[in-house]
Each structure stands twice: as C-alpha cells, then as structure tokens.
Image (spheres, rainbow, N blue to C red):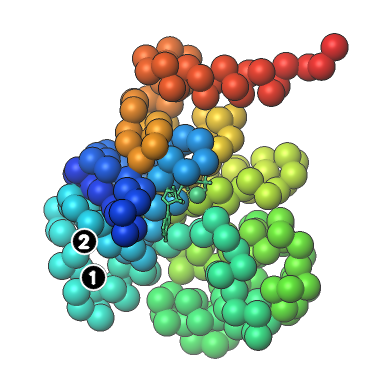
Amino acid sequence: MTGIRIEATGVARRYGRKTAVRDVSFVLGASQRVGIVGESGSGKSTMAKIVTGLERASAGTITVDDRDLRSIMSTRAGRLEYRRRVQLVAQDTTSTFDPRHRIRESLRTPAQILGGHDAAGADAAIGEITTELGIDPSWVDRYPSELSGGQRQRMSIARALVVRPDLLVCDEAVSALDVSVQGVVLNLLKRYSDDHGAGLMFVSHGLPATAFITGELVVMNQGEVVESGRTLEVLEHPKHPYTQKLVDAHLAVEEPVA
Ligand SMILES: Nc1ncnc2c1ncn2[C@@H]1O[C@H](COP(=O)(O)OP(=O)(O)OP(=O)(O)O)[C@@H](O)[C@H]1O
Ligand SMILES: [Mg+2]
C-alpha cells in the first residue's frame, strides 16, 4: 500500500452568504501526519469534508496524486476508489451509523464493498480491527443507541480502518475518549499510519494529542490558514499571535489550580 498526496490550493467554501473557509492551501504528503487546529468555527470540519470529497470546494483545487479531485469524483468508479483510499472519521458519530442497524452491519458494508471481502472475510476483518482498537467484541452486535459516545467514536474509527485506507481523516476522533483510552487509540492510529504508510489528517482541539501524533501542523482561524510548519516548531515558537493565543489558552487550562 502506498500513501496518497493531497494538495489544497486556494480552497474556499461558501454556504449561502457565509464563507466557511477561504484561500486555504496546504500539502499533505504521502504517509505524512498533518494536524489541523483552530478554535470552534475556524473551518476545520469543512476542510475535512472537502478533502474526503463529501463537500465540494466553491473555489480552488484539491489535487490527489496530481489528479483533480473533481475529476476523480465525477465517475462512480472514481468515487468508489477514492472512498476506499480516503476515509473520514466524522466529528458527529450519530450520522456515521444507521440507528436501525446493528454496528456490525455498518462495518460489513464498507468491508465488503470497499475492502473487497466476502461475508466471512468481512467478519474476520472486523474482528481484527476491533481487537486492535481494544473494543469489546460484544459492542459490534449492539445498536448505535446502545453505545456511549466514546464507544461509538471508537467504532467509527474501526469502521474507517476496516477498509485499510491510504489516508485517514480524523475529525475530533479522540475528543470524546477519556485520557487513557485516548492514548491507546492515538498509539494505534500512529502504528496504522507507520505500518501501512498511510497518511493522517488529524483535526483536533487538543494540542497535546495533535503534538503527539502529527509531524506537520496547520493553524486555522476564521476560515483561513494563519500559520503552518513542523508541529513542534509551530507550537514551541508560534509566529502568529493567534497561534500564541491557542498555545497560551492551553497552558492556562493545564495549570494546576492552587
Ligand atoms: N452546512 C453549513 N451551512 C452553513 N454554515 C456552515 C455549514 N457548515 C459549516 N458552516 C459554518 O462554517 C464555519 C466553519 O464550520 P466548521 O464546522 O468547518 O468549523 P470547525 O472548525 O470544524 O468548528 P468546531 O471546532 O466547532 O467543530 C462555521 O461558522 C459554521 O457555522
Ligand atoms: Mg468541526
């Protein structure tokens, strides 16, 4: 398996009169792990959806290994192949699972259609990925409403990884998890990315998790990129006042209360 290179150039997205993102450019190299941080409403989820092809850019281009994403998405075969290669772990897990079906059904479908497994192979792949994620096997046979938010979030990571994507786009994928489980999942995502040469676009409010898992960082504010570079460099020596503010806010939260 090889990674996938994504280049965003001057991307904008408008919803009516609202501009969610404007003039966003960045490169997500094959096998790279890139963090997208910024406060609520800065356009992170919008970019995650555009990169995964769920939303169209109103302006600008997304280039995928030197092909235009719009042309890839213009055919059914292109859409299927892109869906296999690029998976999103959505911020809102309630939309990921059909409430009428047990979780297993929601994992079998991508494992069969995108992963190319037969029914038995799909179940084996589901068993493998849930074990890796430290998921209780019985959760798979529950309905989404019977799981906690954190359990559902881990299932949505399993659902994305069961097709073995070349790029995983995680939108606040570990935010609902308690710190110990967060550590397990972050390590797993890192190992997956290393073992498969898969890229990771990691959208998060959490600077420590982002610093742990990504090598590159893009800082967004009000729909625009204000700063980007090596993650540790950006967080240790922020150049933009907004990045400084984000880092300071974080340190303030972490300060023990006397
Ligand atoms: N479908 C939509 N219709 C109208 N406005 C939208 C839509 N989706 C997003 N927006 C607006 O675009 C802006 C960016 O939203 P987005 O969800 O990308 O932010 P975010 O950085 O992911 O925020 P959060 O950290 O809260 O998840 C917000 O002002 C939001 O209200
Ligand atoms: Mg969001």
Residue at (40%, 76%) from the top-left corner? 114
Task: Find residue 141 and report its image quarter.
Answer: bottom right
Q: Judge whether 198 appears above or below 187 on screen.
A: below
Q: Name the residue under label 1.
A: 73
Q: Mark 2 points at which residue?
A: 69
Q: Where is residue 71 in the image (x, y as percent from the top left)?
A: 15, 67
Q: Position of residue 13 (x, y in %)?
A: 29, 53
From the viewer's perspective, tell me whether residue 145 is left or right of residue 13: right
Report if the CB atoms under discs 2 and 1 are less than 8 Å apart.
yes
Classify mark 1: residues with Cα within 10 Å, few (<14), some (14-19) or many (20+). Answer: some
Mark 2 falls on what kind of element?
helix
Residue at (76%, 62%) from the top-left corner? 148
Give the quadrant of the C terminus.
top right
Q: Is mark 2 within 8 Å of ligand 1?
A: no
Q: As shown in the figure, which amino acid type bears the numbered disc 2?
A: Leu
Give the camera-side residue of 61 and 79. Answer: 61
Task: Find residue 98 and report its image quarter.
Answer: bottom right
Task: Find residue 135 and report its image quarter.
Answer: bottom right
